[in-house]
Image (tube, helix red, strand yellow):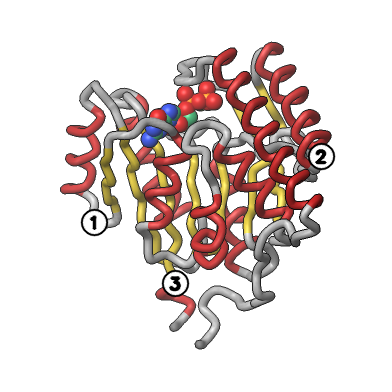
Amino acid sequence: MSVARAMISVTLPVLNEQTRLPRSLPRLGQFLRDGARLPFEFEIVIADNGSTDRTQEVAERFCRELPEVRVVQFSERGRGGAVKRAWLGSEAEVLTYMDVDLATDLDAFPALVVAVASGRADIAIGSRLMAGSETNRGWRRELISRVYVRLARAVCRLRCSDAQCGFKAISRFAAQTLLPQVEDNGWFFDTELLVRAQWAGWRIAEVPVKWTEDRDSRVKIFRTAWEDVRGLMRLRRELARNRKAEKPDLAGPEPSGKKMGAKK
Ligand SMILES: Nc1nc2c(ncn2[C@@H]2O[C@H](COP(=O)(O)OP(=O)(O)O)[C@@H](O)[C@H]2O)c(=O)[nH]1
Ligand SMILES: [Mg+2]
């Protein structure tokens, strides 16, 4: 396989995004074609589960007009489930997703992809809470985000500085191994993916991002926080059971170290 033909996939999970999708998708397409300076082909996958507005119509129009755009549609709600479905259905070597509001500045995207494509990491995540990040958001979400990540670190031994930023990349091999183990299909999906990846020894790289809050949000903050806490406790119990049984946490990766585009 030649480097020039390697493919990255960018999933845009969407729920009732008839307004934000037409603003963001052309910008993203332009960036991937001209701005990103990545030597890879790309596809954009719009993953829509459960929209009740005109999102489907908008997505299908983009799909007809732009050859690099695909749409996947299904009924169960949840951002995690949408990302999982889109990633498992893609042939690309590097699978990424980002929120459709483009709250994370696209400037960080090449670093995210290169971390995985080069073989340096199996997963790369945008972080709003590490040195070099710039975050512009209200105090309430800032506080919740900081408290949550501390909790995840204490309860589940997470070592990342930010779990929930909607800006992530994963190798196809890691995705195919890890995704079937991830039970959550909602907002906790991201944390569960990272926790399971760390338990099993996959390598995670963090990339600092510029992040600007878009106040148009699908998140129901208290319900989501409660579901996140329940998710952490579920993983905690699993960790305790595994320790008691003296099992290795989960099957880890075969160290591949293979770079994307390397000859097979
Ligand atoms: N496919 C899908 N996408 C969702 C769902 N819920 C939220 N999203 C998408 O997830 C992304 C982040 O949502 P947003 O409301 O901006 O979250 P916030 O930035 O954390 O407030 C957006 O692209 C949403 O359209 C869902 O149930 N299914
Ligand atoms: Mg948002």
Q: Position of residue 102 (x, y in %)?
A: 49, 34
Ligand 1's quadrant: top left
Q: Position of residue 108 (x, y in %)?
A: 61, 47
SS type, badge 3: loop
Q: Quadrant location of residue 120?
A: bottom right
Q: CA distance from mark 3 to mark 1?
A: 17 Å
* Placement of 208 over or under 263, stated as above or below: above
Q: If you read the primary sequence from the N terminus, does the residue marked by circle 3 or circle 1 appear first? A: 3
Q: If you read the primary sequence from the N terminus, does the residue marked by circle 2 or circle 1 appear first? A: 1
In the picture of the structure, the residue carrying the numbered disc 2 is 131
Query: What's the residue at 51%, 53% (across, down)?
Result: 179
Classify residue 140 as left or right of residue 260. Answer: right
Q: CA distance from mark 3 to mark 2?
A: 31 Å
The response on whether ligand 1 sits within 8 Å of label 1 is no
In the picture of the structure, the residue carrying the numbered disc 1 is 67
SS type, badge 2: loop
Residue type of the residue flagged with mark 3:
Ala
Instruction: Please tell me which residue lies in front, 158 or 44.
Output: 158
Classify residue 160 as left or right of residue 70. Answer: right
Quadrant in the picture for the N terminus:
bottom left
Q: If you read the primary sequence from the N terminus, does the residue marked by circle 3 or circle 2 appear first? A: 3
In the picture of the structure, the residue carrying the numbered disc 3 is 6
Query: What's the residue at 16%, 48% (across, down)?
Result: 64
Residue type of the residue flagged with mark 1:
Pro
Labels 2 & 1 near each other (Cβ < 8 A): no
Single out the residue that lies furthest toward the bottom: 264
